[in-house]
């Protein structure tokens, strides 16, 4: 086998392997919920048919003349297949065959060998090639497996391509009666000629050659186990002596075979045959499966219950910022400062009024634990303060405080952030930044005991002093 043959063989083998690996890798992701485990994927087939030296795409017979399909005799061809289906689109098939290929011309076509004097002598008109065995690994691509009109596929079209090895032995005859005449040999005598794998005469060992099968076919499902398989395959060989020596020289020969047979799916009948699987109906069955539907309904119920719980936790009827579930003082008047339990905060006496303007008293602005973010209930108080400062051209001191959790340094920064958060709100409301002074005092000047949560809530504040 020359370098060109080895190169073409390697390319063809790489192509088949790459296609098979790609489809196998793709099939690792189940095409339906259950994956391949819910199908029968192995099958074995028996087939038989006839051979012809020609192919549908054209070609020459062994003797170098263009011959039509029906001018060739047919030979028997039979074998078996073993296939693994990886998805509804792709499978790998191991195919083995044996049989005969026969060909002839109506007119004398050419000698098997020229004699020593250069004259043609008796000429070969026919040849019979015995295929002792042929084996190939094929990638089988199934076509039209998706059907939106029917639940199950009863007919399956496919195409296949592979790479194989065949052992063959060609015999040439001087007329069209196979086995009934003699032919001139390369040693100067007449007799039936057998061309072996090394020597032209006397060696009955079969020649070994590479071939690439390319074919199409159709399968008809007869039952859950049995399918009728019909197909046509063109076999492109790497051999110039497939029919013995000819005027073609080293031109590569080809042959084709038409076959029919039965394919038997292996495995439990409780599982569907993946070869005839329709992914559309399978997906539909999965969706309408009672157990799956019940699981979906149960999930919906759990989501509904969770949404109800969330609604209950977030419901705040009196708008004081504390949900009804944790509000110990429901129906608090709007704008009333409340603690974490929803109860009004009691501020120490005496009530300090604004010295400069004698305006309304402004309650301290409360904050959540470890937070300098303004609460929405503080907006109305700060809006009133901003209006007073703008209208009266007044100024204000903002004193920020924190409860006693954490370090003093951390609480000092936190209290300063709280004071500046109030200042920023006033500036955004149109108050001049120079009219507002924000200062943080940390844990100093608590208005309630830091030993209780109620007291700590009151200490997280910004006090407002208008001048």
Image (cartoon, helix red, strand yellow):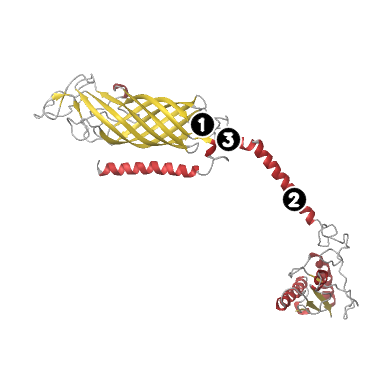
Q: Residue at x 49, y 38 (%)?
A: 87
Say if mark 3 contacts mark 2, CB within 8 Å: no
In the picture, measured across the screen, residue 333 lies left or right of residue 27, that is right
Q: Residues within 10 Å of mark 3 (few under 14, many from 20)?
A: some
Q: Residue at x 27, y 27 (%)?
A: 130
Residue 133, image quadrant: top left
In the picture, measured across the screen, residue 230 lies left or right of residue 420, that is left
Residue 200, image quadrant: top left
Helix, strand or loop for disc 3: helix
Q: CA distance from mark 3 to mark 2?
A: 34 Å
Residue situated in front as seen by the camera: 85 or 268: 268
Q: State the count of labels.
A: 3
Q: Is residue 88 above or below residue 420?
A: above
* Residue for badge 2: 307
In the picture, measured across the screen, residue 138 lies left or right of residue 225, that is left
First reached walking from the N terminus: tag 2 or tag 1: 1
Residue 220: % across, % down: 48, 26
* Residue for badge 3: 282
Q: Residues within 10 Å of mark 1 (few under 14, many from 20)?
A: many
* Residue for badge 1: 276
First reached walking from the N terminus: tag 1 or tag 3: 1
Image quarter of the N terminus: top left
Helix, strand or loop for disc 1: helix
Q: Is residue 377 above or below residue 268?
A: below
Image quarter of the C terminus: bottom right
Residue 319: % across, % down: 83, 60
Q: CA distance from mark 1 to mark 3?
A: 11 Å
Q: Is residue 11 above or below residue 374?
A: above
Residue 345: % across, % down: 86, 69
Q: Residues within 10 Å of mark 2 (few under 14, many from 20)?
A: few
Residue 250: % across, % down: 22, 36
Residue 249, image quadrant: top left
């Amino acid at each position: 086998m020359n370098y060109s043959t080895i190169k073409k063989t390697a390319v063809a083998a790489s192509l088949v392997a790459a296609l098979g690996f790609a489809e196998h890798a793709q099939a690792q992701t189940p095409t339906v919920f259950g994956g391949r485990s819910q199908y029968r994927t192995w099958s074995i087939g028996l087939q038989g048919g006839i051979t012809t030296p020609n192919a549908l795409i054209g070609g020459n017979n062994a003797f170098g003349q263009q011959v039509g399909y029906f001018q060739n005799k047919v030979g028997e061809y039979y074998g078996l297949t073993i296939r693994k289906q990886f998805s509804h689109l792709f499978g790998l098939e191991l195919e083995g065959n044996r049989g005969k290929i026969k060909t002839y011309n109506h007119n004398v076509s050419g000698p098997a060998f020229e004699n020593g004097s250069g004259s043609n002598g008796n000429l070969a008109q026919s040849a019979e090639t015995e295929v002792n065995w042929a084996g190939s690994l094929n990638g089988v691509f199934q076509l039209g497996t998706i059907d939106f009109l029917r639940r199950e596929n009863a007919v399956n079209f496919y195409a296949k391509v592979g790479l194989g090895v065949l052992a063959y032995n060609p015999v040439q005859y001087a007329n069209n009666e196979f086995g009934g005449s003699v032919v001139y040999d390369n040693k100067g005598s007449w007799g039936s000629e057998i061309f072996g794998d090394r020597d032209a005469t006397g060696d009955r060992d079969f020649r070994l050659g590479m071939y690439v099968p390319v074919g199409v076919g159709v399968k008809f499902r007869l039952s859950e186990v049995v399918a009728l398989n019909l197909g046509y395959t063109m076999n492109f060989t790497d051999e110039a002596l497939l029919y013995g020596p000819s005027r073609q020289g080293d031109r590569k020969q080809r042959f084709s075979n038409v076959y029919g047979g039965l394919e038997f799916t292996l495995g439990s009948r409780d599982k569907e045959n993946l070869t005839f699987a329709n992914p559309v109906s399978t997906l539909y069955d999965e969706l309408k499966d009672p157990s799956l539907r019940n699981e979906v309904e149960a999930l919906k119920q759990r989501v509904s219950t969770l949404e109800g719980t969330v609604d209950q936790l977030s419901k705040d009827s009196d708008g004081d910022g504390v949900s009804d579930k944790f509000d110990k003082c429901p129906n608090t008047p709007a704008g009333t400062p409340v603690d974490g339990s929803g109860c009004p905060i009691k501020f120490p006496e005496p009530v300090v009024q604004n010295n400069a303007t004698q305006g309304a008293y402004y309650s301290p602005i409360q904050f959540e634990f470890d937070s300098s973010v303004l609460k929405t209930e503080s907006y109305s108080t700060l809006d009133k303060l901003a209006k007073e400062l703008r209208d009266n051209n007044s100024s204000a001191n903002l004193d920020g405080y924190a409860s006693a959790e954490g370090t003093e340094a951390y609480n000092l920064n936190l209290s300063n952030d709280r004071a500046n958060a109030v200042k920023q709100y006033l500036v955004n409301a149109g108050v001049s930044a120079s009219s507002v002074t924000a200062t943080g005092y940390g844990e100093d000047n608590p208005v309630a005991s830091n030993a209780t949560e109620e007291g700590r809530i009151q200490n997280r504040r910004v006090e407002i002093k208008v001048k």
